[in-house]
Image (tube, grey):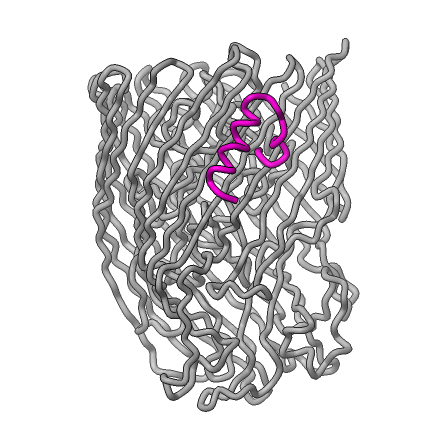
Amino acid sequence: MTLSSVMRCSCSVMFATFACAPALAQAQAAGVGQEDVAGLPSTSADAAQQGDIVVTGLRRSATAQDTAAAISVLNADQLDKTGVLGTATLQFQTPGLLVSQDLGLQTQVYIRGIGSNLQGIATANSVSTYLDGVYLPNTTQTNQSFNDIERIEVLKGPQATLYGRNATGGAINIVTQEPSSQMEGKADVSYGNYNDVNLRGSLSGPVVDDVLLARFSAQYENRDGYYRNLYTGHNIANLRIAGFRAALKVIPASNFDIILRGDYTYTESGDFLKLRPATSVYYAGNPQYYTSDPRAVYYDIEPSQPARDYGVSGTIHWSTPIGKVTSITSDRVYAVGPIYYDSDQVPQPGTYFPNGVGAIGSYVRSNSLYHETYLSTDEKRPLSAIIGGTYFHENASEFKRILGPSLAQPRTFTDRYARTTAYSGYIDAKLKLGQLSIVGGIRYTTENRAYDFYRTDPVGAPTFNTRKDSKWSPRIGVEFRPSPDLLLYATATSGFKSGGFNTDVPTNSFGPESIWSYEGGLKSTFLDHRVRFNVSGFYYDYKDIQVLQYLTVNGVISPIITNAGTATLYGSDATLDIKATQNFTVGGGLSWLHSAFGSALFCDPLKGSCTNTDPAQRPFFDVKGNRLPRAPEISANFYADYKIELGSGDLTFHGDGSYRSRTYYTVFQNPIYSAPGFWLFGANVRYTASTGWFIEAYGQNLANKLAVTQIINSSPLRNPATGAILYGTAAEFDRFAPPRTYGVRIGTKF
């Protein structure tokens, strides 16, 4: 599909042909069920924004429709309707966003093909995640469970000027509900298949009128796993979530307030990856342990991964004669473990931890301190600016216990420690010249990292490394508003991600990656505010890409990170929302992406030994022209909402669908390491009484599609000297989206 064909499709929908509506859908909006002057509900992810709904994606308070960037916003109501309960399922309602999880549920977030599949505490994400303005550094920690959320903002494209390091692909802002000045509350309970019990509740209101406000919320979920261990007969990868949030808002003066927040979430889950029979090095000698059921395995080590995510923060807002000062200070802890998982899926009865490959009690911990203070001057003036600075410090540790591939090589015990300290200062300004505005800014970032590696069994010499990365990150652009309902913009923006260290070889570090984005678009509202149409086009110049490969090193599968040269990406995003009648709204969004590597050499483990003692015999190939991993050409979704007004309340119907085209998971664009395209469909029916209580039925993945969301590959076991295959063929592990889920929810709101 070409860019011109995408634009033709977008325009045909815009003029109410609806021909492309199933493929054009990016739904969900900010603001909880509110309507603008035309009654268009808040149901679009980056088109259907109303004039009174404020987002802060570009660090300025503005509606998404007035924000000169591709930004998708989902509110609490739409999160419920579409079954988005956390970061992992957010991708199915935001075209251009892809979330996959590696071993140990390490979360990999990609926006428009830019992301990171790196692992370990010595690396970082390429898409930044923020919780109430606080940066979340750990890869597993970024898979948040959504509790008492006001809105989720997804910014597409590099954001280094406004968000700093590690925002090469974009940023995700998770914004929770603030304490309210009026007493309010809500509670609901649901029951679904897989014995899924989910309870949520919140209470908010004044403690001392106009001086002290408070909010408390809690959630609990208990669900059986979607998978079956045929060796033990147990359901595996069960889910347990228990968490709470508390917030106090102190208002000592009309121009000054402080919000104190605290939260704690305990999550217990387990990893599940399915080996394909034709590519497994293990099934060759144990075919009796293969089952064609994609959601069943034979495990002698059942997966378990308990995690604790908690923290406190304070946010100060101070309105001064020169502008508004915002200051955020936070201390967060993320701890996961002991982690157990089984990678070989071949049990050996009668032997404890026999011949397995997997984690047998690993721990990971991250303790991070984040501070940011910035001044935002009055945006109504001809010249306004945001001036600020940030400080970040993290101590991370990993206590890793891995089983070896044989009794002769039974285990590897390692301790790892990483320390990161980063500073930045930035300014971002806007000059209004009538209908035209010029925007621009720059940030300077410096980061110091250190990494220590200890092999405790078998004992090895400790190794360590340090590195420092600094970067200037500018952006510049123009905005033009010929009428109140039309905004045109063009920007050039940079992105920056710091370097790091290979997990098992600290002396082998990798360098930073960088990106320049050139983007233009329009945001429009017309036909008496009943139609909203947004479109943007972008071009990325991507350099020194950090890419991970799974290679066999001395008979052991190891992650190796390298800088992969350059790539170019370009594409388009379009969203459309149409209020066909007072009670019927349809819309959607489409993301089209072209990606191609520049000249870059990679060792292909399917062609030979990448650890051959003779470097000349290692099978390096130029991947020039190949698509980037996790960069599908097309992703889209659509929605439809219909309301029937009854005398005693309202009956609402919601339906949505999401699509993703074929996705490759290695740089070699090998078909066996690609996932076919898929559609997922969901629906929701709710009766809401005029007294505030409701009952609803919901369902997700109604067609029960086996949708692959991650593929992990590795080479065959080879002789490191000759490259000859010692045993089997290459292994491939698949991860799937949840199967069909459905249930009933009842609740109340006051």
Front position in the image: 552 or 130: 552
Q: Position of residue 465 (x, y in %)?
A: 28, 70
Q: Which residues are magenta?
A: 1-24
Where's residue 48, x and y in %? 52, 23
573 to the left or right of 585 = left
The residue that appears at 54% across and 66% down in the rendered structure is 670
Q: Name the residue: 76% across, 41% down.
A: 192
The answer to whether one can see residue 176 in this image is no
Quadrant of res 155? top left
Residue at point 58%, 60% (across, down): 674
Can residue 527 be seen? yes
Total residue callouts? 0
Residue 41: image location, x then y, percent:
57, 19
Q: Name the quadrant containing residue 158.
A: top left
Q: Is residue 590 magenta?
A: no
| 135 horizontally vs 86: left or right | left
Q: Reply above or below: 585 against 706.
A: above
* Relative image position of residue 418 (x, y in whole percent): 35, 63
* Viewer-closest of 671 and 718: 671
Tell me, yes or no, whether the highlighted magenta stretch contains residue 4: yes
Considering the image in quadrants, where does the C terminus appear?
Answer: top right
Magenta stretch: helix, strand or loop mostly: helix
Q: What residue sits 39% from the left and 88% below the top?
A: 613
- Up-down: is 211 above or below 290? above
